[in-house]
Image: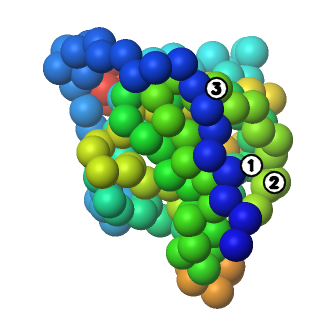
């Protein structure tokens, strides 16, 4: 088993999350979101995600380039088979490319908050997969525009 543990600066504690209004989507357990910005012209969608401790979210594949920054806690990345692949501690900054391996994310021993900046967004940002890696849904620019509008209302 190969697992990456990224090293970062010492843990910081910023209680900003107490001031964030979190939203959830039916059918997506163990995750909450707050959309920071949707810029259709620049093809960027910026989102804060809060992942539940010791849990895994739905299997998916990123269909847009992205940047993540772990703001608090420990972001864990799991292979499609559920095996722990990578740990991103507070302060970890990662740049990823579209169409990577299917995976799940989740929190470590405490809830984790991470910033995701999706770049070069086309129609689809996240392709949702079943356990056999078959596409069963997607979240794209249009969905995030609608969620952002509803969040701002």
- Considering the numbered disc 1 on the image, is that residue within a helix, a strand or a loop? loop
Dot 2 or dot 1, earlier in sequence:
1
- Tags 3 and 1 in contact by the CB under 8 Å rule? no
Left or right: where 88 falls relative to 1: left
> Relative to residue 60, is residue 108 depicted above or below?
above
Residue at position x 37%, y 50% in the image? 108
On residue 93, the disc is: 3
Left or right: where 149 falls relative to 129: left
Q: CA distance from mark 2 to mark 1?
A: 5 Å
Residue at position x 67%, y 79% in the image? 133
Q: Toward the viewer: 30 or 151?
A: 30
- Considering the numbered disc 3 on the image, is that residue within a helix, a strand or a loop? strand
Q: Which quadrant is home to the C terminus?
A: top left
Tell me if I can see residue 111 in this picture.
yes
Residue at position x 70%, y 72% in the image? 1
x and y percentages locating residue 130 in the rendered image: 56, 79
x and y percentages locating residue 13 in the rendered image: 30, 16
Question: In this view, which residue lies farthest toward the left?
Answer: 18
Dot 3 or dot 1, earlier in sequence:
1
Residue bearing the label numbered 1: 63
Q: Toward the viewer: 66 or 54?
A: 54
- Considering the numbered disc 2 on the image, is that residue within a helix, a strand or a loop? loop
Residue bearing the label numbered 2: 99
- Tags 2 and 1 in contact by the CB under 8 Å rule? yes
Quadrant in which residue 96 is drawn:
top right
Alpha-carbon neighbours of circle 1 within 10 Å: few (<14), some, or many (≥20)?
many
x and y percentages locating residue 42 in the rendered image: 74, 15
Q: CA distance from mark 3 to mark 2?
A: 19 Å
Q: Toward the viewer: 69 or 61?
A: 69
On residue 83, the disc is: none
């Amino acid at each position: 088993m190969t697992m990456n543990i990224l090293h970062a600066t010492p843990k910081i504690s910023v209680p900003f999350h107490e001031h964030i209004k979190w939203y959830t989507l039916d059918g997506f357990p163990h995750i909450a979101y707050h959309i920071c910005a949707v810029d259709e012209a620049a093809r960027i969608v910026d989102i804060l995600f809060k992942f539940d401790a010791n849990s895994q979210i739905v299997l998916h594949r990123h269909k847009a380039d992205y940047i993540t920054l772990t703001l608090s806690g420990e972001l864990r990345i799991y292979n499609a088979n559920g095996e722990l692949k990578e740990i991103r501690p507070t302060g970890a900054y990662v740049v990823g490319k579209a169409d990577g391996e299917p995976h799940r994310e989740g929190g470590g021993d405490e809830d984790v908050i991470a910033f995701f900046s999706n770049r070069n967004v086309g129609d689809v940002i996240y392709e949702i997969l079943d356990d056999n890696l078959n596409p069963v849904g997607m979240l794209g620019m249009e969905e995030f525009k609608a969620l952002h509008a509803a969040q701002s209302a």
